[in-house]
Amino acid sequence: MLLLVVTTAYGQNVKIRGFVRTPDNQPFPGVTVRVKGTSVGATSSGSGEFSMGNVPANGVLVFSAIGQVPQEIPVPAERGKTLTITMQPDQRQLDEVVAIGYGNVAKRDVTGAITSISRDAIEKRQPVNLIDALQSQAAGVLVMNDAGEPGAEGSIRIRGFSTFSSAGNNPLYVIDGVLSESAGNINPNDIESIEVLKDAASAAIYGSRSANGVIIITTKKGQEGKPRVDVRYSSILGQLAHKLRQANADDVRAYRKLQGSSGTSADSLNPGFNADNDYQDMVSQQAIRHQVDLSVSGASKNMNYYTSLQYLDDKGLIVNSWNKMARARINIDYSPSTRFKYGNRMQFSYQKRNNINEGNTFNQLFQRPTNFTVYYPDGSLAGYVGGRRNPLANALYEMDETETYGGSIFNYIEVSLLKDLKFTTNFNVDLSVPHNVSFNPKIISSANPTRNDGSEAFDLNIGWQYQAYLNYTKTVNKDHNFNAMVGFSAERARNNSFDIAGTDYVSENIYTSNAAGTLVNSGTRTGASAHSMASFFGRVGYSYKSRYLLNATLRHDGSSRFGKSNLWGDFPSVSAAWRVSDESFMRWTRRYLSDAKLRVSYGQTGNERVGDYDAMQRITFGSSYYNGVTGAVPTSSIGNPNLSWESTRQFDAGLDLSFFNDRLLFTADYYVKTTRNLLYQRPLPSETGYEDVRINLGAIRNKGLEFAVNGTPYRSRNFTWNTIFNISFERSTILQLYGGEEFIAGDKWLVREGGRLGDFYGHKYVGVYAYDQSNAYTDNWERLTPVFDENNAFVGYNHNGEKYNGAVHHMYGNGQLLKGGDVEYENISRDSVIDDADRTVIGNAQPKFYAGWINNLTYKNLTLSFTFNVTWGGDVYNNAAATLNNYNTTHIIPQPYVIYNAWKAQGDETDVPRVQANSAWNHRISTRYVEDASFIRLSYVKLMYGFNPAWLSKIRIKGAGLYVYGSNLITWTNYSWFDPEFSSSNALQLGQDNGRYPRRRELGLGININL
C-alpha cells in the first residue's frame, strides 16, 4: 500500500493550467479549484487564470464559486493542455425569492427597499427573541436591546420616529401571512427568513399600519428526504457587566457632616448606622439561562411538516427575577394534487415571570444609605428604615408574577384556478390569556402601622383575521412578465379584563381576594374593548427581461377607531427599477460588475394605532363615588369625532450593485419620509374640566442615508471570511404643530416646529460660583473676576485682565441673590434673572448614525462569528444620577464625587454646588446630567466546532456541533451609569435613564445535534 501511494504521488502526477470564464466569456476571478478528495487546490486570479502542480493524472477537478453551479472535470489525458472552464449561474440562487405582501418576488427583481435575513444569519447567534436576531443585521433598522431583565425585549425602529404616538412607532409584523403588532412569542429558531420592508412602496400594501415599516417573518418547512430531528441545548451564564461607585459608610458620614449633622446618623458607633453594605453585591446574583430546542421535520411528495418545542428557564441578575417559557409550533402543508394545497400554522406558548419593580428595588440600591441596617439582630430582614426601602427585602418579598397562555391557529387554502391564476384564502385565530398576581407583604410596607396589599388581574384577548386574494402571473414572448394581485381582508380584536384589589390580607401566603380584609373600590373593576378593520388591496407589476421593472399597489382600509367621516383611508404606492448592467453600453464592466440596479419609489402608508374609542365621548363607571355610592361620569379625555388617519409619504432612491459574481454586494438608499396629521394626546386647560383630547397635530419629516456592504474578502478550500457592514444616518425635523404652538412634553423635552423629537430642554450648566462676589457681570452680562488682597479681603473686579470700574450687575434665582456655592446657568435672555426664558435645547436623544459589523470566519470545521454594533452622537439624560444628587431627600445619599467635590467655603473651585436642602435652584434640569450616549459594543461572539460526519455516522448521528457563546462582552462608552443602550416607550420623552435593570455580560456553552 505504501508503494502504491508513492507511485501515485510521484509517478503519475501532472501540472494543470487553465482559465475560468463567465458565460459571456469574461475572466472569472476568485473561483476555488481543488482536486477532489485531496488538499491540493488553487484560486483563479484576476485574469481568471489558475495553475496547480502535483495533480493525480486520474484525479477530478472541482470548480466552485459563490452563486455558481459547482463543476467536476476529469484531469485531461493530454499532458500540457490548457483548460478553459465556463461557470454557470446557480439557477436556484437566481430564482431565490423574498416575501412581499400577499406573494413572493424574485430577489433580483425587487423594486423597493427590502433587506433579507436568512436562517443562517440568525443561527450564527444565540437569539432568545426577535430583538437578538435582528440587531445590526439591516441598515435603517435601529434595534435597542433591553437584554437584562428576564423576559424583556427592546424596541425596533425602522427609519426613525415618525409619530408622537408611543405604539405607532413600532413596525408591523407579518408572521406567515398573519398581521400582528408584536412578535414577542416567535421562537427565533423557527424562523426561515426575515424580510424588512423599509420604504413605502414595499410596505403600502399593508396600508394603515405600515407607516413604520413591515417585518415579514417566514417560518421553517421540512425538506424532502428522511425525517430530520434537531436537538439544541445551551447554558449561558451572566453577570453584571460592571458595578457603579456608590457611597460607602465613610462617604455617608462625610456627607452627614456636610449637612451639619452631628447626631446618631453620623456616629460610626451607632449600631443602627454602623453597617457598610454593598447593595449591588447583596441584591445581584449569578444569572443563568438554560434553553432546550427540539424540532422534527420532513417532507414527501405531497406533504411537508415542521414541528418544534422550546423550553427556556432564565434566572436574572437581581435575586428573585426570573422567567420561564415554553413555545411549540406545528407547520403542515399538504398538496393532494398540483392544483390544490392546504396548510396550517399552529403556535402555542406559555410564560411565567416575576416582574421586578425597578424603582422599588434597583433604584433603592443607590438611594438608600449604605450604613442602614439590612438585617435585624435576630436575622430577619429590615423593612423601611428612615423612610428608605430595603432593596433586598423588596426583591425577595415583593411579588408581581404574570402567567400567560397564548396560541394561534392559522389555516390556508391555495387553489390554481387556471395555469396563471391562483386563489388563496386563509383564516387565523389568536388567543392570549395573561393572569397577574401582585402582593406586597407588611415587611415592605411604608404605611404606619404597616399593612399588606395585593391585586389580581385577568385578561382575555382574542382576535381573528380573514384574507382572500387572487394572484395572476403571465409571461408573453418570454420577455414580458405581468403580475397582478387583488384581495380582501377583515379582522376583529377584543379584550376583556377583570381586576380586583385588596388590603389587610389575613394570610400573607394566600393571594386570592377572599383573604383580603378590605376590597379597594378603585382597583376592582371589569372592562372591555374591541377594534375592527376591513380592507381591499391590489398590486400590478410589469417586467421586461428583468431589465425594466414597474410595480404599483393600492390599499383601501377602514378602521373602527376613527370618526364616521374618516373611517376609510387610501394608501397607494409606485416603484420602478432599471437593471443598468443588462444594457449593451455596460458590457465593458462585466468583468467586474455582475449586476447593477437603480430603484426609485414613492408611496403613502398610514398609522391608526390609537385608543379604540378616542373618536367617541366616553363614560367611565366605578371610579367616582359620592357618599359611598358609585356613579357614571365622563372620562378625563374628550372624544374627537373628527379624528383622522395619520399618513406617511415616503420617497426612496436606491442602488444595488454586485461585483465579482456576487462576491461583493453593495446597497445604498436615500429617503425622505414625511408624516402628516400626527396623532397626539393634547393636554387641555383645567378650566375645561377635562385633561386631554386626541387630535391630529402636525407633521414630521425624516431624511436618511443607508449603506450596506456584504463581501467575501477571502475564500479558499479550507478558509472563508465573510463580512457584512451597514451604516445609517438619520435626521428628523418637526415641520408643523397645531397652531404652530410649541409645548414641553414631560418636564424636559421641547417639541417645536423646526426641532427634533428627543430635544432636551433646560439650562446650560456653566459652573459654581467660587465666591459670593463671583456673581458679578458687566452691562453686557460678561463675567467679572473678583480681586482679593493679601488678607483675602475683596477689593474690586477685573475684566479681561484689567481693572473694572463700571456698573456691576448680579444674577438672581428664585428671588434670591446667588452666592458662592450656587450654580451659574447661562444667561441667555441677558437680564438679571435666571428663569424659563433662559432654557434652551441642551441635547438630543437620537443618534447621528448607527452601524453594525458582522463577521463570519470558517476554517475547516471551525466557525467564528462576531458582531459589533455602534450608536453614535445621541445624548442621555441621566435622571438616576440627578435624583441621587439633589440633596432634597434626607436619606438619599449623593454619589461620592459629589460628596467630596461639593463647594464648602469661599474660594472653592468646583463644579458641584454646596450641600443644602431645599435648594431646588441648584438642581434645575441642565446640561449637568446630559451625557454622551455613544458606544461601540462587541455584541455577539460564537465559536463553533462541527464534528466530522464520518465519525458521527458510526453512532448514527447525521451532524453535531459544540459552541462557545458570549454577548455584551466589551463596551466602549463614556456614559457614567450602567448602559447607554435602552428603549424608550414614549416617542415624546426619549433618552431618559431613570435607573434601569442592568444588562448582562454573558458567556456559555451549547451543543447542536442532528439525528
Image: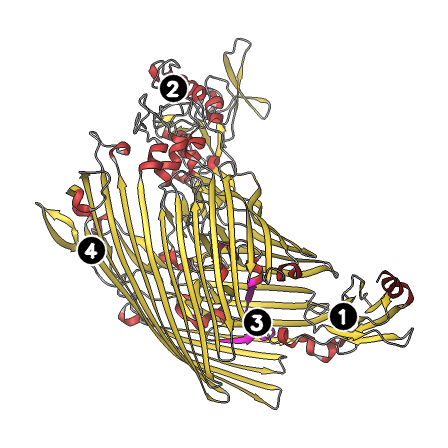
Mark 2: few/some/many CA within 10 Å (<14, 14-19, 20+): some
For mark 3, give the secondary structure. strand
Mark 1 or 2, which is nearer the eye? 1
Q: Please give the residue where the numbered disc 2 appears in the rendered image.
A: 259
Name the residue nearer the viewer: 139 or 248. Answer: 248
For mark 4, give the secondary structure. strand
Mark 3 or 1, which is nearer the eye? 1
Instruction: Work out whether residue 237 can be spotted.
Output: yes
Label at residue 245? none
Mark 4 or 1, which is nearer the eye? 1
Real-space Cα distance between discs 3 and 4?
Answer: 51 Å
Q: Earlier in the sequence, mark 2 or mark 3?
A: 2
Real-space Cα distance between discs 1 and 2?
Answer: 81 Å
The quarter of the displayed image where residue 829 is located: top left
Residue at 31% x, 44% y: name it: 400
What span is in magenta?
103-119
Q: Earlier in the sequence, mark 3 or mark 4?
A: 4
Locate residue 215 relative to residue 709 in the image: left or right.
left
Q: Earlier in the sequence, mark 3 or mark 1?
A: 1
Residue at 40% x, 45% y: name it: 322
Q: Earlier in the sequence, mark 2 or mark 4?
A: 2
Specify the amino acid type for callout 3: Val
Q: Please give the residue where the numbered disc 1 appears in the rendered image.
A: 62
Label at residue 600? 3
For mark 1, give the secondary structure. strand
Label at residue 526? 4
Position of residue 517 measured from the top left corner of the image (x, y, whole percent): 15, 40
Q: Earlier in the sequence, mark 4 or mark 1?
A: 1
The quarter of the displayed image where residue 280 is located: top left
> Is residue 107 rendered magenta in the image?
yes
